[in-house]
Amino acid sequence: MRLHGDAARQVLADAWERWAQRCSRLTAEEWATPTRCGGWDVAALLAHVCPEPAMFGRLAEAAVDPPAAVTDAALMLRRFNEPGGVATTNADSIAGNAVSDAAALTATAAARRFADSAVTLRAGTMPESTVIAYPVVGTTTLAVIVETALMEATVHLLDLAAAVGGVEPSPEALAATRDLLVAVPDATAAVEVLAGRAPFDTALPVIR
């Protein structure tokens, strides 16, 4: 169930609202709870995944003429996570930035950013076909960015739930994320792993 257009926007907005609601209830102890993302506590996890309402303006400014170089979120994730891809080469800097950014973030501020971003997303007027300049791949569409953001919000919401509980992704977000991630590896490798014909590490994990 790959989601696109208004359906994807609404499910992502719902995911951000779930983040906002859980952030608004975080205690000081929960804020400092380690997560299963190595080296990150809940504060660092929030600093990594928390959107900023200002990003919508930056997306509008990044609009360029079509066609887009990448029009499939699975392809973009495949490129990011291939051997030598940015998911690996930039992993240490991304992890370090989350830890340092967490020092300037509070649970209240994170809740507000998630809630405000959800409102802006629901009211969004940019069509999903809008082409955006984007790092590594050159250009992609707004639809790809939204689908990828939904995956990230869903996977990390599961990380938050594993650390402190009290929240879960929607069934729609889980199904969409599952179907996107299944589409990332080579089709033959994925089928052989899922059918028990090949070891997991020939196709999994598909993202870092």
Image (tube, rainbow, N blue to C red):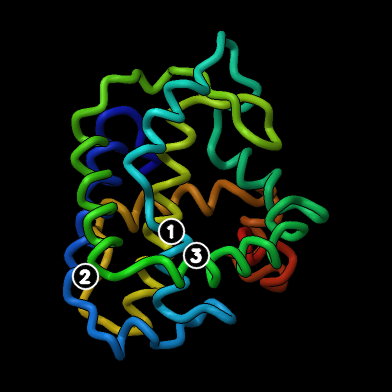
Amino acid tagged 2: Arg
Distance from Cα at disc 3 to Cα at disc 1: 11 Å
Residue 149 x/y as whole percent: 43, 46
| Residue 159 horizontal side relative to residue 196, left or right | left
Q: Earlier in the sequence, mark 1 or mark 2?
A: 2
Distance from Cα at disc 3 to Cα at disc 2: 20 Å
For disc 3, the marked residue is 101
Q: Earlier in the sequence, mark 3 or mark 1?
A: 1
Determine whether the residue tagged by mark 2 lies in a helix, strand or loop: helix
What number of labels is visible? 3
Tell me what residue is drawn at x 70 percent, y 43 percent: 79
For disc 1, the marked residue is 49
Q: Earlier in the sequence, mark 3 or mark 2?
A: 2
Considering depth in this image, is 193 or 48 the residue closer to the camera? 48
Q: Against 140, is 162 above or below?
A: below
For disc 2, the marked residue is 22
